[in-house]
């Protein structure tokens, strides 16, 4: 198949999943065309089966805000015609499904029919989509898609609760390439990051308030009072300065390492004993899954799709959002006994096996085939 993929080309979960999906589909013999405003951060190598087409938005004095949806729709039309793309897989309802539908209608004027598969990732539903200004457009975009998927059962339920959806929604969970998290690379030596007796705690996010990164610092502060530990923070975002100040006030700056943005998540996680994800909301919890794939136990909130990934008492523990004391207690419980820690780490890796891309990507292939078959009968 010739598949067009539209996504945000950033470090966020949806962009990572869309990119990894496209790369795996290309390995399975499909021709993949990424259509977005920048080359996706994990799209390192282009090949005969992987192509990138940049969406440019010309600046006009007439427009106070640049019309990205219009530029994207026009680019989709051009790329479908030029490369004979058979199906469009768009990640995020707004603006991508909305723009894809406009492209689809323009293509129909030329007798070209291209089905749209829309994947809902969370922010487009729980934050953007539920706003009164966008709710009508989100509902329209989902209902006009030829197939709709969500990355968790929780997100599907939220979508059906918040919008008047007529379409079926299929849950296809996020996935990871477990081969990248084998802890086998030569550089994985704990001594590079911490002393032999120190536990390594990790948090990875875009450091926004919704990730409750101040809670991450508070939990770590409680942990390090009970046992030697270091905290590895990966990511950049608006809360970084605040949490740096928090570390200074608590006197733990020497125990916290800020990595910034990184393409070497697997290498950082290979050091880790425990991963913290106390988020306000998560549609899936991809960062937790990446940690689990690296045999890292997880302490998290119980919001959104996280309980579908982090199994309470097995791969880690779940607590109510904002319950720093309970998260701290559970973290110390896991870390304070070596045998217990190893059991949780083994369990985490075992749970992650359920989300290997070799098990999930065929589900998308089946959706593409079914959607194309339905279109041919119309």
Image (cartoon, grey):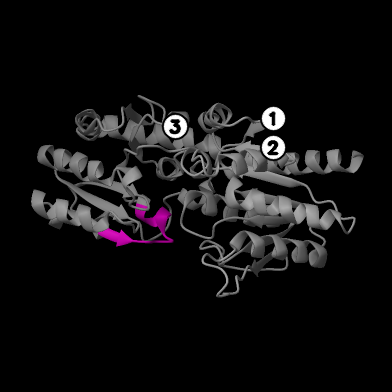
Could you say where residue 85 lies in the image, as x and y percent from the top left? Answer: 79, 58
Q: Nearer the viewer, mark 1 or mark 3?
A: 1
Report the Cα–Cα distance between label 1 and label 2.
6 Å
Q: Residue at x 18, y 41 (%)?
A: 218
User: Mark 1, residues whose alpha carbon is within 10 Å: few (<14), some, or many (≥20)?
Assistant: few
Quarter of the figure that contains the C terminus:
top right
Q: Residue at x 79, y 52 (%)?
A: 105
Q: Is residue 358 visible?
A: no
349 with respect to 325 (left or right): right
User: Mark 3, residues whose alpha carbon is within 10 Å: few (<14), some, or many (≥20)?
Assistant: many
Q: Residue at x 22, y 31 (%)?
A: 337
Q: Earlier in the sequence, mark 1 or mark 3?
A: 1
Report the Cα–Cα distance between label 3 and label 2.
23 Å
Q: Helix, strand or loop at disc 1?
A: loop
Q: Earlier in the sequence, mark 3 or mark 2?
A: 2
Q: Helix, strand or loop at disc 3?
A: loop
Residue 261 belongs to the span the image colors magenta: yes
Say the numbered circle drawn on residue 304: 3
Closest to the observer: 344 or 91? Answer: 91
* Residue behind mark 1: 166
Say the numbered circle drawn on residue 368: none
129 with respect to 254 (left or right): right
Q: Nearer the viewer, mark 3 or mark 2?
A: 2
Residue 368 falls in image quadrant: top right
Which residues, given as a range, are shown in magenta? Answer: 258-268
Q: Are marks 1 and 3 in contact (CB under 8 Å)?
A: no
Say the numbered circle drawn on residue 143: 2
Could you say where residue 18 lies in the image, as x and y percent from the top left? Answer: 59, 52
Report the Cα–Cα distance between label 1 and label 3.
23 Å
Q: Residue at x 91, y 39 (%)?
A: 377
Q: Are marks 1 and 2 in contact (CB under 8 Å)?
A: yes
């Amino acid at each position: 198949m010739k598949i067009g993929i539209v996504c945000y080309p950033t470090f966020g979960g949806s962009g990572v999943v869309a990119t990894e999906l496209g790369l795996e589909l290309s390995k399975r013999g499909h021709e993949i065309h990424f259509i977005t405003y920048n080359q996706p951060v994990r799209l390192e190598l282009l090949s005969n089966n992987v192509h990138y087409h940049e969406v440019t938005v010309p600046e006009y004095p007439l427009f106070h805000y640049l019309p990205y949806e219009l530029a994207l729709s026009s680019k989709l039309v051009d790329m479908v015609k030029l490369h004979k793309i058979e199906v469009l897989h768009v990640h995020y309802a707004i603006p991508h499904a909305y723009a894809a539908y406009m492209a689809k209608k323009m293509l129909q004027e030329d007798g070209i029919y291209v089905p749209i598969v829309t994947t809902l990732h969370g922010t487009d539903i729980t934050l953007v989509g539920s706003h009164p200004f966008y709710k009508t457009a989100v509902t329209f975009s989902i209902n006009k898609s030829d197939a709709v998927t969500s990355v968790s059962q929780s997100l599907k339920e939220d979508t059906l609760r918040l919008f008047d959806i007529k379409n079926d929604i299929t849950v296809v969970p996020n996935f990871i390439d477990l081969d990248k998290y084998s802890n086998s690379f030569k550089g994985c030596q704990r001594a590079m990051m911490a002393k032999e007796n120190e536990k390594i705690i990790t948090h990875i996010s875009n450091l926004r308030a919704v990730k409750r990164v101040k809670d991450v610092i508070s939990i770590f502060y409680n942990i390090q009072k009970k046992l030697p530990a270091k905290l590895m923070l990966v990511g950049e975002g608006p809360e970084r300065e605040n949490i740096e100040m928090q570390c200074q006030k608590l006197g733990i700056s020497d125990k916290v390492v800020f990595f910034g943005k990184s393409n070497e998540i697997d290498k950082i996680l290979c050091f880790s004993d425990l991963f913290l994800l106390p988020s306000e909301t998560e549609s899936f919890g991809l960062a937790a899954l990446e940690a689990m794939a690296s045999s890292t136990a997880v302490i998290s909130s119980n919001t959104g799709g996280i309980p579908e990934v982090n199994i309470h008492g097995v791969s880690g523990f779940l607590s109510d959002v904002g319950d720093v004391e309970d998260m701290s207690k559970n973290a110390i419980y896991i870390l304070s006994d070596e045998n217990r820690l190893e059991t949780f780490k083994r369990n985490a890796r075992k749970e992650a096996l359920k989300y290997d891309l070799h098990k999930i990507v065929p589900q998308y292939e089946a959706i593409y085939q079914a959607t194309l078959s339905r279109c041919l009968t119309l």
